[in-house]
């Protein structure tokens, strides 16, 4: 459930109409609903209420500082994958003790920063990384808390770009190799073995792969506990899918919570805390990208609706061929339905937001809302074609504020310089 709805024919985010936001903040922009974030977080908390747990929100989904600050206030921790994300999270007031650091290629500098901050644990993805973490910890004269990310070799049945739990993926450590590496970690005084971790993929629409993966995790954890490993945390990653299209019914957080609780009840009874790293399910339906129609173009074979938002602003359709519902902000004009491509101004045929989509025929200056864009929208935006990145606006009830200003042209060239010898 989200808080985007029509009132008197105009789409609102909570108590504010999107045309008011377009007037005040310009387009394109992302519009986020505070109440939707709050609700999604609460639903997820409640889905895991049977077990001791910590929700480490996956920052990559939407890393805006205001969103992070709100989530931190509700008790969220964070799953970070870079020094930059760690910086954002600490700046937003999320305690380091609620932060896990994932990712296949952490640098020595990032590891050092995370040790300095005293994060909860590193999710380690290879033997080489384990050695690097041990070396950095030794140099700093401290102990590094770690979990190994195991790769259970299950097919999450999602888009290949975001499937991570198969044996040919770059992520995680195969189970048997992980067992060996745990022995190495347990013998190393600069490492503190704190948990076990697994993440099989994103936009998961079935629970069985999760249950299969957790069975493998649970078995490994029990084996480690029997060996005397001081495990306190089982990190189950993120990945729960959301409905992008009308009629899609991914598992609910409640069903996911039941499956996880069931699969891990013995570990939970042994006192382990379950960490989960949801991103999309918290953020996706809490945001839309608001765009304005620049013009309509008919080339005989096709009709194109050219809008002011493009693949640099929302990459998902171009990169994954993913579907986002697009709706008219103003429903009062009864336009006849037409099949159109909704495209941006970027110089690539891959720049589209929707193809062959049946929409009430838009016209110049109409506002359109691209739904389910709160996750992996702004966080994947770029300056391609020298387009300043768009604004982000947060709505709470009747109030709204720009929580990230639209970039200007000076932002585009910040950091660039021409050496003296260029014009010799
Ligand atoms: N934990 C780890 C280790 C991850 O790699 C990810 C996502 C998550 C948690 C959060 O997964 P979520 O709950 O959001 O599914 N850009 C893609 C999604 C990439 C996901 C990468 N990892 C997209 O737009 O669909």
Image: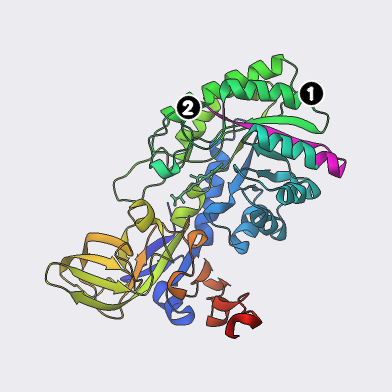
* In the image, residue 218 above or below residue 397: above
Where residue 8 appears, x then y in whole percent? Answer: 32, 71
| Circle number at residue 124 | none
| Quarter the C terminus occupies | bottom right
Q: Indicate yes or no: mark 1 CB to ligand 1 under 8 Å.
A: no
Give the left or right position of residue 139, taking residue 341 as reference: right
Who's the residue at 48% across and 47% down the image?
281
**Residue positioned 52% across, 44% down in the render:** 43
Work out whether residue 336 or residue 109 is closer to the camera in this orientation and state it: 109
- Observer-nearest of 261 and 194: 194
In the figure, 423 relative to 59: above or below? below
Would you say the beta carbon of the disc 2 residue lies within 8 angstroms of ligand 1?
A: no
Farthest-out residue, front: 424
- For residue 371: magenta? no
The answer to whether one can see residue 15 in this image is no
* Residue 170 pos. (x, y %): 52, 37
Gap between marks 2 and 1, in whole Å?
A: 27 Å
Which residue is disc 1 drawn over? 187
List the residue tagged with mark 2.
153
User: For the point 29% across and 46% down, which residue is it?
Assistant: 247
Q: Quadrant for residue 161, please give it.
A: top left
Give coordinates of residue 79: x percent, y percent.
62, 46
The quarter holding residue 196 reads top right
**Closer to the camera in the image, 233 or 423:** 423
| Residue 165, position as x, y percentages in the image | 48, 33
- Disc 2 crowd rating (10 Å Cα; few below 14, some 14-19, many 20+) is many
Q: Is mark 1 on a helix, strand or loop?
A: helix
In the current view of this chain or complex, which residue is farthest to the right?
141
Mark with earlier residue (2, 1) = 2
Asked if 17 appears above or below 215 in the picture, the reply is below
Which region is colored magenta?
A: 137-151
């Amino acid at each position: 459930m989200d808080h985007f709805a029509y009132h008197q024919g105009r789409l609102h985010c909570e108590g504010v109409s999107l045309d008011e936001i377009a007037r005040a903040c310009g387009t394109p922009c992302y519009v986020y609903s505070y109440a939707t974030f709050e609700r999604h977080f609460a639903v997820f908390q409640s889905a895991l209420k049977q077990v001791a747990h910590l929700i480490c929100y996956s920052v990559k989904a939407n890393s805006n500082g205001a969103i992070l600050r709100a989530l931190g206030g509700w008790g969220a921790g964070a799953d970070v994958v870079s020094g930059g994300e760690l910086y954002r999270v600490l700046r937003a007031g999320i305690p380091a003790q609620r932060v896990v650091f994932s990712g296949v290629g952490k640098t020595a500098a990032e590891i050092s920063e995370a040790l300095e901050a005293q994060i909860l644990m590193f999710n380690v993805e290879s033997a080489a990384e384990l050695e690097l973490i041990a070396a950095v910890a030794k140099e700093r004269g401290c102990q590094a808390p770690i979990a190994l990310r195991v790769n259970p070799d299950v097919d999450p049945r999602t888009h290949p770009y975001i499937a991570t739990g198969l044996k040919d993926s770059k992520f995680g450590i195969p189970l048997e190799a992980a067992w060996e590496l745990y022995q190495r970690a347990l013998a190393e005084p600069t490492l503190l073995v704190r948990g076990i971790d697994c993440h099989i993929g994103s936009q998961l629409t079935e629970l069985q792969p999760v249950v299969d993966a957790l069975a493998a995790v649970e078995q490994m954890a029990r084996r480690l506990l029997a060996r005397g490993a001081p495990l306190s945390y089982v990190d189950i990653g993120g990945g729960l899918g959301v409905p992008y299209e009308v009629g899609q019914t991914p598992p609910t957080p409640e069903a996911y919570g039941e499956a996880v609780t069931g699969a891990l009840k013995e570990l939970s009874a042994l006192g382990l805390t379950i960490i989960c790293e949801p991103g999309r399910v918290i953020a996706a339906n809490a945001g839309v990208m608001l765009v304005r129609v620049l013009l309509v173009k008919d080339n005989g074979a096709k009709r194109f609706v050219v809008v002011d938002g493009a693949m640099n602003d929302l990459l998902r359709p171009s990169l994954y061929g993913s579907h986002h519902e697009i709706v008219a902000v103003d429903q009062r004009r009864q336009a006849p339905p037409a099949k159109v491509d909704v495209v941006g101004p970027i110089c690539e045929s891959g720049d589209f937001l929707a193809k062959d989509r049946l929409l009430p025929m838009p016209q110049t200056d109409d506002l359109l809302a691209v739904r389910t864009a709160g996750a992996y929208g702004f966080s994947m935006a770029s300056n391609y074609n020298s387009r300043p990145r768009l604004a982000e606006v947060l709505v709470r009830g009747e109030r709204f504020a720009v929580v990230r200003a639209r970039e200007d042209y000076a932002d585009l060239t910040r950091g660039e310089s021409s050496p003296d010898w260029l014009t010799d």
